[in-house]
Image (cartoon, rainbow, N blue to C red):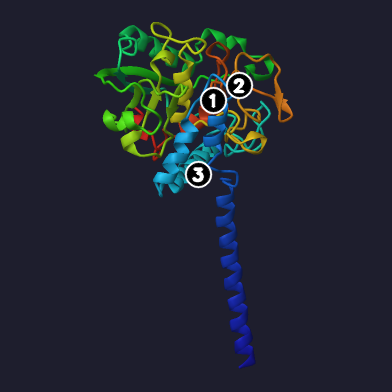
């Protein structure tokens, strides 16, 4: 009987050992996608209000909008976690890829990052664009020429054919990325409305709903008010409010414009958010990240036209990145890591996969 019990105990130990091995493999697989640094809520509500109160001339309310949507939609946090997980998994699985996409890099691809090497097999991705012009006066009813000029800027900026991309300092020159994303104007809709400002609570979107947002980028051009240039919705948010909102005087390069945000880069910045890019400083000072390894850590936005180098968090800021807050004339690049991050959302099962031709 004792021998029988000992035999059963040995079998049990062997079975447990096999199970432990299986769990270890499973855990190892999970560890290939490190989500330990992921976060959603930020201090953007107070940060942006303070910047406006201090007289800083540029404000993007995409992160404030994200906080609001997280509060209003109980499932959004998990949805965006899943999107992030799948994006990191896709980037890590690219041929020649080198990591999950998290971590602060120093301008050279970083460790644990998404330097962007490797073919994702998605080809050139074209995004058709619907523009909704909502106006209360003739200035806000911007011309077709102004709209077309903005589409031209998007194509130049996202394909890195903009002439100023060559200005990148040596430290960052090798990171300037052609995202292989293009934009085509699918239609313009004009709406006269006596409301003089629309705010950031998506009222303009509910008044003039997006058209086929699963396959088209919808951009509302209207006066937001409060010194706010624009805001966007990140992938994973409600379909009924998906898209980008930009002030008419910050849209395009000709017509009704306000310097120094008169070269179409506000829309480039907001479309970056729409394609899942965070602000270059991670909206949390040096302790937070934008989930792109080849963008240096920073403690906050830059304004105007900063001189190079501008040092923060023990590294040189990439002030010329489209996801900073500098003047239009002084931002001119996305990085290879940002390219990988944007393109990952178009992969099979991704939140914008229906846009792939």
Q: In x, y percent, where is residue 225?
A: 42, 23
Q: Name the residue under label 3.
A: 85
Q: Can residue 117 be seen in the rendering of this structure? A: no
Camera-nearest residue between 245 and 148: 245
Identify the residue at image location x=32%, y=28%: 204
Point out the tag, 2 or 1, that comes first from the N-terminus.
1
Q: How far apart are marks 2 and 1 (CA)?
A: 32 Å
Dot 3 falls on a residue whose secondary structure is helix
Identify the residue at image location x=64%, y=85%: 6
Identify the residue at image location x=47%, y=42%: 86
Q: Can residue 83 be seen in the rendering of this structure? A: yes
Q: In x, y percent, where is residue 153?
A: 44, 13
Q: Distance between the residues labelled 2 and 3?
A: 24 Å
Q: Residue 138 carries which label?
A: none
Camera-nearest residue between 302 and 275: 302
Name the image quarter holding the N terminus.
Answer: bottom right
Q: Name the residue under label 2.
A: 175
Q: Name the residue under label 1.
A: 52
């Amino acid at each position: 009987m004792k021998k029988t019990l000992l035999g059963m105990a040995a079998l049990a130990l062997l079975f447990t050992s096999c199970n432990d091995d299986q769990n270890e493999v499973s855990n190892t697989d999970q560890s290939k996608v490190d989500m330990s640094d992921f976060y959603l809520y930020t201090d953007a509500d107070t940060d942006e209000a303070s910047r406006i109160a201090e007289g800083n001339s540029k404000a993007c309310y995409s992160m404030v909008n994200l906080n609001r949507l997280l509060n209003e939609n109980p499932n959004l946090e998990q949805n965006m976690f899943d999107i992030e997980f799948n994006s990191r998994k896709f980037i890590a699985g690219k041929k020649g890829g080198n990591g999950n996409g998290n971590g602060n890099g120093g301008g050279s691809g970083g460790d644990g990052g998404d330097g962007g090497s490797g073919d994702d097999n998605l080809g050139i991705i074209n995004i058709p664009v619907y523009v909704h012009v909502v106006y209360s006066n003739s200035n806000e009813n911007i011309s077709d020429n102004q709209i077309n000029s903005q589409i031209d800027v998007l194509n130049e900026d996202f394909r890195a054919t903009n002439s100023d991309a060559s200005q990148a300092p040596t430290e960052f020159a090798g990171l300037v990325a052609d995202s292989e994303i293009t934009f085509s104007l699918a239609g313009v809709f004009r709406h006269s409305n006596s409301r003089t400002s629309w705010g950031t609570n998506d009222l303009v979107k509910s008044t003039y709903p997006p058209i086929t947002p699963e396959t088209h980028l919808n951009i509302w051009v209207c006066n937001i008010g409060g010194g706010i240039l624009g805001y966007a919705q990140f992938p994973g948010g409600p379909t009924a409010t998906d898209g980008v909102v930009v002030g008419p005087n910050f849209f395009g390069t000709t017509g009704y414009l306000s310097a120094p945000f008169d070269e179409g880069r506000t829309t480039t910045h907001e479309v970056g958010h729409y394609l899942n890019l965070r602000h270059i400083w991670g909206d949390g000072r040096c302790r937070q990240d934008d989930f792109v390894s080849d963008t240096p850590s920073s403690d906050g936005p830059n304004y105007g036209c900063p001189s190079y180098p501008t040092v923060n968090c023990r590294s040189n800021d990439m002030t010329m990145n489209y996801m900073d807050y500098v003047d239009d004339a002084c931002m001119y690049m996305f990085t290879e890591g940002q390219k990988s991050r944007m393109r990952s959302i178009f992969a099979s099962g991704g939140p914008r996969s229906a846009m792939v031709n």
